[in-house]
Image (cartoon, helix red, strand yellow):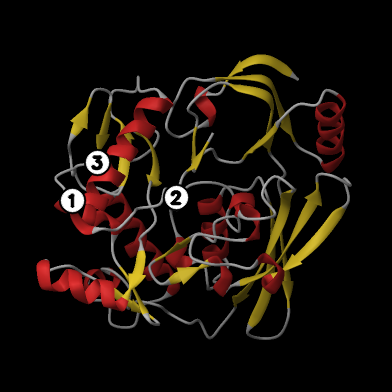
């Protein structure tokens, strides 16, 4: 157990804040012991995975627990399907690569997403036409009140767009210990319709792509658009893509004829990056913080010296300008502490 501990290396924004107490956990028993310590001392709790979806705006006056639970297991269901269970502390992208090495399909479109397995169900991570809920079976969680383990299936997790029960009424009540996915061993469902995947495959002359081909293209696209957190502090997409009523979208089309939108039932999903770019933010820097020059959806710690408050304040300015111009209120995807 460390006291007055710097969290700068443990968040991808590289914000220098301190935790009153900090511990790294490798076993369930050690986790239960840490939780008893926090309960006895009435300390606020914060769990850290890869630190890739969090913005610290201040020091944390409680106990920060870094979950390092490791392990991956495979259970065949039939000739075409397997269950893959990964512990919370496994790196997400390394899990995707592990599955590809074994020719297991389902995670390839989620290549190179930062963070760890344990946080993946919390916001139902997704990219290029795939979301966690598409291949999710269940997750094992620890109830922080009873210190007992429980199983949450697909229905109980109540997944939505970048949302789940763990961000709603279950927030702060559970910690995810491991996640089980159902993947394909043979007849893979290759998804190439979303984003630039199809055109990138065509450029490479690949007509019948494998799951590895799809992964390689996704990695290439992400690397060309998104900054590496190891080089420039960021948390990937800072905002959710807003979903608005069809009538509102049609009204906006009258004023902004090039506005892109993706039908979603009686609503339309509008790319937040496009809205932000139209407001003149792409590549714009204020002090230590900037909107990334290649992807306006990403806010970066441009100098490496930014405080969490500076990053948060820029996000507020972006939200206000988009609301003023388009009447759409952007929602932060990153967890604010």
- Read off the residue under disc 3: 292
Image-based side of 71 in relation to 239, left or right: right
Kind of element beneath mark 2? loop
Measured along the vertical axis of the image, is residue 17 above or below residue 229? above
Circle 3: element type: loop
Whole-percent x, y for residue 250 in the image = 21, 76
Task: Give the residue at mark 1.
Answer: 277
Q: Name the N-terminal-most of marks 2 and 3.
A: 3
Toward the viewer: 257 or 5?
257
Q: Position of residue 77 (x, y in %)?
A: 73, 80
* C-alpha distance separating marks 3 and 1: 10 Å
Q: Report which residue position mark 2 lands on.
A: 333
For numbered disc 1, what is the local secondary structure?
A: helix
The reply to whether dot 2 and dot 3 touch (C-beta < 8 Å) is no
First of labels 1, 2 by sequence position: 1
In this view of the protein, which residue sits in the foreground, 203 or 111? 111
């Amino acid at each position: 157990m460390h006291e007055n501990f710097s969290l700068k290396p443990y968040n991808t924004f590289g914000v220098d804040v301190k935790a009153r107490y900090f511990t790294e956990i490798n076993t369930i028993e050690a986790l239960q012991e840490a939780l008893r310590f926090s309960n006895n001392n009435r300390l606020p709790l914060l769990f850290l995975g890869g630190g890739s979806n969090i913005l610290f705006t201040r020091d944390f006056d409680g106990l920060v627990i870094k979950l390092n639970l490791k392990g991956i297991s495979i259970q065949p269901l039939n000739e075409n399907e397997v269950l893959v269970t990964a512990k919370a502390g496994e790196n997400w992208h390394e899990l995707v690569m592990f599955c590809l090495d074994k020719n297991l399909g389902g995670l390839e479109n989620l290549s190179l997403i930062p963070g760890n397995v344990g946080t993946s169900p919390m916001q139902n991570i997704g990219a290029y036409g795939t979301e966690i809920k598409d291949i999710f079976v269940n997750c094992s969680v620890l109830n922080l009140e009873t210190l007992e383990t429980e199983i949450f299936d697909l229905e109980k997790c109540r997944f939505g767009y970048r949302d789940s029960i763990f961000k709603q009424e279950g927030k702060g009540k559970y910690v995810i210990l491991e996640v089980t996915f159902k993947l394909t061993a043979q007849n893979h469902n290759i998804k190439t319709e979303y984003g630039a995947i199809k055109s990138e495959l065509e450029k490479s002359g690949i007509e019948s792509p494998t799951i590895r081909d799809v992964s390689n293209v996704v990695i290439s696209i992400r690397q060309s658009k998104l900054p590496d957190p190891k080089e420039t502090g960021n948390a990937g997409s800072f905002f959710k893509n807003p979903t608005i009523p069809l009538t509102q979208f049609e009204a906006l089309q009258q004023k902004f004829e090039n506005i892109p939108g993706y039908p979603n039932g009686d609503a339309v999903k509008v790319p937040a990056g496009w809205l932000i770019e139209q407001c003149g933010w792409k590549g714009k820097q204020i002090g230590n913080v900037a909107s990334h020059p290649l992807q306006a959806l990403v806010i970066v710690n441009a100098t490496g010296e930014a405080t969490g408050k500076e990053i948060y304040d820029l996000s507020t300015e972006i939200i206000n300008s988009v609301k003023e111009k388009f009447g759409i209120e952007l929602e932060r995807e990153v967890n604010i502490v």
